[in-house]
Image (tube, rainbow, N blue to C red):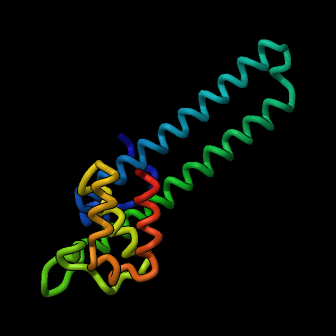
Amino acid sequence: MTIDIIDLGDPQYADLSPVQLSMVRVAQGKKDAILAKANDAVRQLIYLLTANDIARSTVRERERARIEAQAEADVETVREDLLHQLAYESLGSEGNEFGPYRYPENPNYNLTYSQRFLIVRNYYMEITSDPDARLQAYAGDTLARAYLGEFYQTLYELLASYC
């Protein structure tokens, strides 16, 4: 697999953790799928126009440009998401004198409330696949109330929506 979703030199690859490398590979797979789907759409367009004897019309170029622009926008979204994930993952690798930051054992109070929200949400999404048990565990979490502040209710509503 050729990695071209983001431009990283060899020294930068050496610093990526296995989790981060996995994120890059998944994003590259998404990009490849988007481009393959766009190529298929262009091919189908050509077949359709050829079948209707209008393959040389301006419709072909306009539609091709629209499909390619949409594909590029989708790839850019995947790229931006990957960059945010890599930055977020690197935040979690730091720690203090009590060890690496990890909710609920050693929460990181230096994060913004929205970053804390993501950490707590990921924690509860990973502990169980049962939405009712997840909501019940979250409702009894007193640390989350203080750690999330006003975001506590938002996460509660999100977890309740899965039930």
- Relative to 40, is 1 on the left or the right? left
Residue 156, compared with residue 162, is above or below; it is: below
Q: Position of residue 156 (x, y in %)?
A: 41, 66
In the image, residue 48 sits, relative to residue 76, either above or below, namely above
In the picture, measured across the screen, residue 74 lies left or right of residue 137, that is right
What is the quadrant of residue 149 in the picture? bottom left
The residue lying toward the viewer, choosing from 119 and 44, is 119
For the question of whether residue 7 can be seen, the reply is: no
Which residue is located at x 33 percent, y 69 percent? 119
Give percent across and percent down for residue 112: 41, 82
Q: Residue at x 37, y 75 (%)?
A: 116
Q: Looking at the image, how many numbered discs can be counted on the residues?
A: 0
Where residue 44 sits, quadrant-wise, is top right
The N terminus sits in image quarter: top left
The answer to whether residue 158 is visible is yes
Q: Residue at x 31, y 76 (%)?
A: 144
Q: Is residue 56 above or below residue 52?
A: below
Say which residue appears at 46% left-offset and 52% top-offset: 5
- At which x and y percent is residue 29? 42, 42
Q: Which of 105/88 is in front?
A: 105
